[in-house]
Amino acid sequence: MNKTAEQLDKEICAPDGLHKALTSPIMKINFIFIISVRQIFRSIVWDQDPCHILFHSSECVLDLYFYYITNYFSTYSVFSLTLDIFISYKFPVFYLSNEYTISIILLVIQFILAVGTHLFGFLGVPLAGYVPMCTYPPKLTSNFDLINEFRTFVMVLCIGITLVILYFSVKTERIIHQRSYDTRARYTAFENMTTSKSVCILIVIQFLCIMISSFGVTIIRKFEVIIPQEIYHTIVPFLPGVTYANLCLPVVIYYRTIQAIRRRKTRIVTITSAPADVESHIKWLNETWRM
């Protein structure tokens, strides 16, 4: 039965299972790395008082904006990367001449989608009742699961499109290397394939990590009634996948950038050391681009 705001505001004390989950050692570690220092402070100070350990939803306004907009922004970064690689693949000349403008437009679209999703989920929702952590949505939120299902759909669609583009990029590069001796065409195909691989890796990592906080949350919420309360509230705080995604991305970007620079330098050195006569040059190109 749905409860009113007045009824929810009276449920100030944490049930026994929830209280045990919030004060367990593993949750204190989780609070440090994923939630907040404010959460761990409360779990220590009110360790023995289940009626002061919960947060009223009105205390979590800033957290709701920061956490969920960041979460949605990360989700739509997958969409932006996919659209970026699609434009560069289908319209390479246009993309190269408008690369900066396209990036700005995609970032603006990404931000608008993130804010719009947040407003759809939380605009006008009464901040009534108490929540274990400020990453939990308000009790009267009705669109939360719908948003997570939509995010999952967007990411699955993006990963599918990206894999198709990567397949055709690799296929095109192989065809060009077999049939063309034009250095520019070969190098452009190589660059397209390398870029597609790099972006695909970024999207896959974002996809896997953010899926935890969208599809994972949706699934576990459906089984909340049959999962013991202590176990449920111990698992849920570890699901904010955006945290893991944001930790992974800088490492992957750095690694892929260094790798791309190294490959470019190798190709440029190889190209500039080409033989002078045409026959030797053609033979050299065949050998070089088969490496």
Image: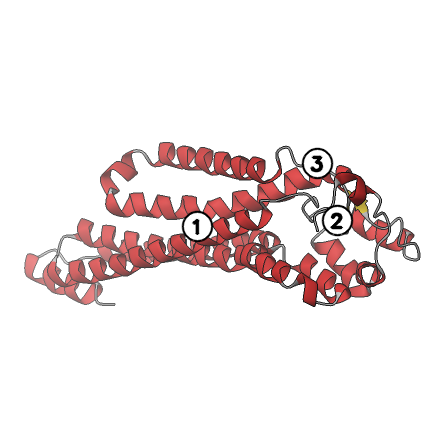
Q: Are marks 3 and 2 in contact (CB under 8 Å)?
A: no
Which element is circle 3 on?
loop
Pick the quarter of the image with the C terminus.
Answer: bottom left
Q: Is residue 76 above or below residue 33?
A: above
Pointer 3 local density, CA inside 10 Å: few below 14, some 14–19, many at least 20? some
> Is 177 on the left-hand or right-hand side of 193?
left
Q: Position of residue 282 (x, y in %)?
A: 10, 61
Q: Which residue is mark 3?
A: 126
The residue nearer to you, when weighing 118 against 70, is 118
Residue drawn 71% across the image and 63% down it: 232
Q: Position of residue 30 (x, y in %)?
A: 73, 58
Q: Are marks 2 and 1 in contact (CB under 8 Å)?
A: no
The residue nearer to you, when weighing 282 against 45, is 45
Which three-letter amino acid code belongs to the residue tagged 1? Answer: Val
Residue 256 location, quadrant: bottom left
Which three-letter amino acid code belongs to the residue tagged 2? Answer: Ser
Residue 269 location, quadrant: bottom left
Q: Which residue is mark 1?
A: 154
Q: Is residue 158 above or below residue 5?
A: below
